[in-house]
Amino acid sequence: MTHLAASQRLSAYLDGELADPERQVLDAHLRGCTVCRRDLAELARVKSLLSALPEVEPPPGLLADLREAPARLTSVLDSVMAWLRSAFRRPAVAAAAVMLALLLIVLPIAKGRLDRLQAANVGVDVYVHEQALFSAADPFADPAYLGLLISDANIALVGQRRSPEEDR
Amino acid sequence: MLRYQRHEIEAYEALVERYGRRIYALAYRMAGNDADAKDLTQEAFVRVYRNLRRIDPAANLESWLYRIVTNLYIDLLRRRPKARIESLDAPLLTTKGEEVVREVPDPGPKPEELIVDAQLDADIQRALLALSPDLRMVVVLSDVEGRSYEEIAELARIPIGTVKSRLHRARRVLQARLAHLMPRGDRG
């Protein structure tokens, strides 16, 4: 047995889990190898340290908690589910619930659409009227008019003939 | 959803009675602290409770519970990957970069023996925490709980050969980590 193979079997050897032919070979190797002997002693020490660890006692109250906690947890869930189920067992209640759900979904959609249709009908007229009044009262506050002033002072008014200079 | 009969609740309580301590002890050695061990144990038993009707009384419930605890623990690690252990001896750095020695409250006088034991326990637990959860599980089952390779193979659902190699690797790491506790006579 090579040294590597031997050193990899030390743990099993220590636990008495090595079958006989292998075990005897390892015995022979150990007699001649101080490194493996030391490793074996140290592995045995690790094992005995771990087995000497005191058993950890659960904190007081944990076991009682374990007994009761899931029951408490599920009993809350349970009662809610039971209430829902009993409510839905009556057809009238179930039908009312379905109607209510439909109303809640359909109404806002329908209302939004109607509003938009109405706005499209009235919208342009109202906008133009208001804009005209506003602009007449205070031309410089009208962003459209301001834009006209700043960007293109040369623009011709509608219906007016262009001057010959501009056509050049 | 769940509405258990009286005898089913009694069966659950019997399971707590039977496995509660052992599961807590395992969770403690896996997680290394009481708070996480408690959480893991509670979570494991909530699962038992939820699956009470699906549990086959003939099946190996212990193996199932052990696997749940290990998986929950791995989940726990995944959720807080930056968890680290702070050494109480290491000096603290202030914001100005100066080193300040930590002031640890004196736990008060205790019998000599107990201090040594608690110290040793903490040393070993710290060494255990340095192992990957897979290796830790195997070495805890074998050396702390004293189970055979066959039992471990069944509990962890891995082949015996894997138990052997994991156990060996785990002990090697512990051997290096606990070098200060090794016998001196045979050195060199």
Image (tube, helix red, strand yellow):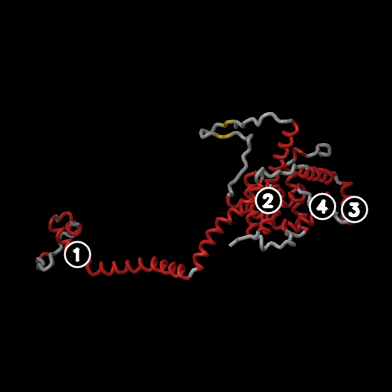
Determine the CA span between mark 3 and mark 4.
13 Å
Where on the picture, by quarter, is residue B154?
A: bottom right
Q: Which residue is mark 4?
A: A12
The quarter of the picture where the N terminus of chain B appears is bottom right
> What residue is drawn where x is 78% and y is 52%?
B147
- Which residue was labeled with disc 1? A126
Residue ID for mark 2: B132
Question: Element under label 3?
Answer: helix
- The image shows residue B53, relative to residue A11, as above or below, that is below
Give the spatial CA distance, label 1 vs label 3. 106 Å
Residue topped by disc 3: A24
Do marks 1 and 2 both belong to one polypeptide chain?
A: no
A79 vs B123, left or right, is left
Image location (x, y in percent) of residue A2: 84, 53
Under mark 3, the amino acid is Gln
The one nearer the camera, A117 or B133, is A117
Kind of residue indicated by mark 4 = Ala
* Distance Cα–Cα, label 2 vs label 4: 20 Å
Mark earlier in primary sequence (1, 3): 3
Q: Are marks 2 and 3 on the same chain?
A: no
Residues at marks 1 and 3 on the same chain: yes
Q: The disc numbered 2 marks a residue on which chain?
A: B
The reply to whether the C-beta atoms of the residues labelled 2 and 4 are less than 8 Å apart is no
The secondary element bearing badge 2 is classed as loop
Asked whether the beta carbons under mark 1 and mark 2 sit within 8 Å of each other, the answer is: no
On whether disc 1 and disc 4 are found on a single subunit, the reply is: yes
Mark positioned earlier in the residue sequence (3 or 4): 4
Residue A158, percent across and down? Answer: 13, 67
- Mark 1 nearby-residue class (10 Å; few <14, some 14–19, many ≥20): few
Answer few, some or many: residues within 10 Å of disc 3's Cα (few below 14, many 20 plus, some between 14 and 19).
few
* Marks 2 & 4 on one chain: no
Are marks 3 and 4 in one subunit? yes
